Amino acid sequence: MVVASAVLALALLGNGARAAFGLTTTSSGYKVDTNGGLVFEVNKSNGDVTSLLFNGVEYQGSSKASGINSGLGTSSVSAETIGSKYIRITAKSNSLPVTQYYVAKPDDATIYMATYITGEVDPGELRWLARLRQGSLPTGVHGDVGNNIGCTAFEGKDTFKCSNGQTRCKMYTSDRFIDDQIHGVVGSNAAVWMIMPGTAYETSSGGPFMRDINSQTGSDQELYWYMNSGHVRTEAWRFGLMGPYAMKFTKGDTPSANLDTSFFADLDIQGYVPASQRGSVSGSASGVPSNFEAVVHWYNDKSQYWAKASGGKFKSPLMKPGTYTMKLYKGEYEVAKDTVTVTAGKDATKNIASAEPSTSVVWRIGEFDGRPQELKNGDKIERMHPSDVRMGSWGGTFTVGKSSASDFPMALFSKSGGTAKVNFDLTADQVRDLVLRVGTTLSFKGGRPSVAIGSWTGKDPGAPKLIDSRGVTRGAYRGYGEVYSWTVPASALKSGQNTLTIGVYGTGDQDFLSANYIVDAIELQGPAGTSG
């Protein structure tokens, strides 16, 4: 009977039955069985994840291990079981200012993680990168937008064109941080998800509308979480604890993004701040029209947080104590700025109201909301290159009163697409000094608007602050958000039809890598008339 029981036990294990939750030391690493279908192994010399077995199938890629950036290098790696509740593996790099934590819980096919950094890393960005088996997990984030298989690189090493004229880039898989609590890659028998719950982004940089790579489909299926990014970077990197965050395995279903990581308070994780040592901010956000999303943003040099207002009310996540800049956005367009102090154990009350002036306009194209999505090609630019065959033409003519916002290009380039023209009528009482206002969301290589009406040419406003990163060709649309204004003299205008020609100051490389800028909205301020 004893022999029969042993044979039966071995047979059950061979058919995928789970062993008990536990930690095993092997010749090369530490193996963790979650007793939830996931068994993973961490290299004891460098902290790489070298095996990801889920329900008996290996999902770790064969070309490179999974880990932080290109790896931590030689590291001090330790592993321990904490009571019967948790297994924690700590990998402290000997060459980088980085400590990586891996945590497992019983009956949970999830690797909980946190990354502690004290300085910049080479190549100057910080990201978790899982390299998975593409054949088993073929579908990346947002489908094929990051799938470069069979396509040819034509811009840098990361932007590809396929034989059907469509374009691919790993940056096209990105979503705004404020919307990106979970993303994953999927196969027929499994899916792997990155989950960034609660305050996971608090030590990242870039604010609520920052975006970066979520996946890339090539020889491996790569699954990312960017913590600090150099792509269209607009603020200094923060240091400290990144996370907690998690990588979860399922049979294909999408798990909840509301992942409880409060148990990190029991794990002696460097830099972790528990809920008991945090405070919050709540109040009203007023003055943002109901057809726009109202977003409240708090930040200082150590932390960042955000919340969407609902019904004019907001409540922040639990925040580290300190004094914060507090901003209100209409969509992604800043309309108010203040400061607030957060104290541990308390909920501060702080109201904020839009300070956006209400001005009379002759006409407006688009909306001042910090995004170009309502303009021509704006609905496509996050997921494809400007040269993609699915894009509409660039440049063109817009007629006030006849054209719609989707007829005006969301970007203008100094060497591709030509200028854009706006035809508009004025009544006699509108022929006076008027203000032309052009809002932009991102500039590349110093690109800024050139404007002319009749015999008048607007003064070159000068190059904006340089962001040393490709933008619109890699799906990015948000930078510093410069807004330019000119006074158009009455002598340049006439009763009846007028034409605004808008182009680009700046040169740079060819085609879509020439100087360019992305348009937020354009308006001619002045007395409203029948031209509307």
Image: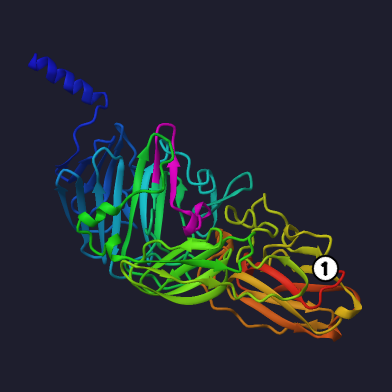
Tell me where residue 94 appears, x and y as whole percent: 20, 64
In-front residue for pair 46/200: 200
Label 1, secondary structure: give it: loop
Residue occupying image coordinates x 84% and y 79%: 454
Residue 158 in view here: no
Residue occupying image coordinates x 55% and y 64%: 471
Please identify the quarter of the rendering in which residue 372 is found: bottom right
As drawn, which residue projects farthest toward the left? 2
Tell me where residue 86 appears, x and y as whole percent: 20, 46
Task: Say which amino acid is labelled 1.
Answer: Gly
In-front residue for pair 361/130: 361
With respect to residue 519, does 49 lie above or below? above
Query: Magenta part of the protein: which range?
Result: 171-193
Q: Is residue 342 left or right of residue 403?
A: left
In-front residue for pair 314/188: 314
Residue occupying image coordinates x 46% and y 55%: 213
Please identify the quarter of the rendering in which residue 98 is found: bottom left
Q: Is residue 418 left or right of residue 254?
A: right
Q: Is residue 390 left or right of residue 263?
A: right
Mark 1 is surrounded, within 10 Å at the Cα level, by few (under 14), some (14 to 19) or many (20 or more) other residues, namely: some
Tell me where residue 60 appears, x and y as whole percent: 33, 42
What residue would you read off at disc 1? 532
In-front residue for pair 144/382: 382
Is 232 covered by the magenta stretch?
no
Is 176 covered by the magenta stretch?
yes
Tell me where residue 77 appears, x and y as whole percent: 18, 55
Name the image quarter holding the C terminus: bottom right
Name the image quarter holding the N terminus: top left
Please identify the quarter of the rendering in which residue 18 is found: top left
Residue 73 in view here: yes
